[in-house]
Image (cartoon, rainbow, N blue to C red):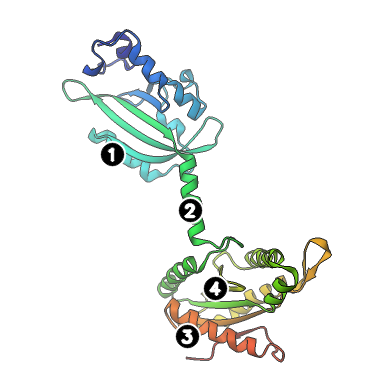
Amino acid sequence: MNPNATSAVDGGGASVRQTQTAGLPDGLFASALEAVSEGSLITNAERRIIYANRAITEITGYSADEMMGKNCALLQGPETDAVTIQLMRDSFESGETFRGEILNYRKDGSPFWNSLTVTPIADASGTTTHFVSVQRDISPLIELQEQLRFQATHDPVTGLPNRTALAAHLAEALARGSRAGTALAVGMIDLDDFKRINDTYGHPVGDAVLREFAQRTRACIRSVDVVGRIGGDEFLAVFEGLDATQPLDDLRAVIDRLHEAHSQPISLDGGVELSMPLSMGVALAPAHGTTGVELFRIADEALYSVKSRKGTRSEWWEVAADA
């Protein structure tokens, strides 16, 4: 075996034997490790680093000298997944190769997603003497995947959850309410006269109004509440964790904040100021229904009712009549 290749994995124990290196010119195996674009680490049986190639420095910011003798845990940080770490340890103990993705941290503290393969190397007796890892920074791929997931579940104009995401959230919220014995409200919200804004000022101004609505609403609802865009100028809010005996008492406090947040005109470029009156129909669970489909329908009927009395009503919102 090439002596240079052997020394690269000499951690004070048995050297790694790879018959593939037989006959290679001196230093070629070590040079090959330095040339590959993937990061490579070799540790001894105690998982102390005894070799780090140039790519590892480029990925992590640590020099080879800084890594020597350290455990690979120096790349872990506050958001590194504990389950993945345990899976790695289990693989090490069983002598199996680990393959997975893990959030690691560079020397400067910045996180990166690492595609990692760790292979144990055993001596002739079957005892693991070293571990060889191959690492690749896949942060751009993970970021792209996150962007695609976000785009699939969020409205592109406002950044709010879309109908699909709202339906999934509502199903989970109903299940939580059932377990906890709490009530839930679904509010179908419509921006009154929004078509007039689009027709008068154009769709870019209309989009700005939608974004302002989203920003103000998110700022005034509770942390457990969620608002999303159904489409056009229609939005849906889910208010959970309400008192089961008097849900409207809890709900009114939130609705009052909504009214206050949207009572101020919206100031746009060019000195344009627009008012943003709202209408909302409310359905309660479990009083009006126990499924998302039922609550969507009943809240929409209540919205239609309150909008039909827009010129004479005393309140901008209405709870559906008892089912």
Q: How busy is the neighbourhood of tag 2: few (under 14 within 10 Å), some, or many (20 plus)?
A: few
Residue at 37% over, 20% down: 33
For residue 25, which quarter of the picture? top left
- Which circle's residue, 3 or 4, is located before the other in the chain? 4
Q: Residue beneath label 1, please?
A: 90
Inter-mark Cα distance, 2 to 4: 27 Å
Residue 44 vertical position relative to residue 211 in the rendered view, above or below: above
Q: How busy is the neighbourhood of tag 1: few (under 14 within 10 Å), some, or many (20 plus)?
A: few
Residue 267 rendering spot, x and y as whole percentages: 78, 65
Residue 254 rendering spot, x and y as whole percentages: 63, 74
Q: Are marks 1 and 2 in contact (CB under 8 Å)?
A: no
Residue at 69% over, 63% down: 204
| Residue 56 in the figure: left or right of residue 186 | left
Q: Nearer the viewer, residue 114 or 46?
A: 114
- Which circle's residue, 1 or 2, is located before the other in the chain? 1
Q: Are marks 2 and 4 in contact (CB under 8 Å)?
A: no
Q: Residue beneath label 3, please?
A: 288
Q: Residue beneath label 2, please?
A: 148
Q: Are marks 2 and 3 in contact (CB under 8 Å)?
A: no
Residue 92 rendering spot, x and y as whole percentages: 28, 33
Inter-mark Cα distance, 2 to 3: 35 Å
Q: Residue beneath label 4, please?
A: 239
Secondary structure type for disc 3: loop
Secondary structure type for disc 4: strand
- Which circle's residue, 2 or 3, is located before the other in the chain? 2
| Residue 154 in the figure: left or right of residue 35 | right
Secondary structure type for disc 1: helix
Secondary structure type for disc 2: helix
Asked if residue 18 shows in the view, the reply is: no
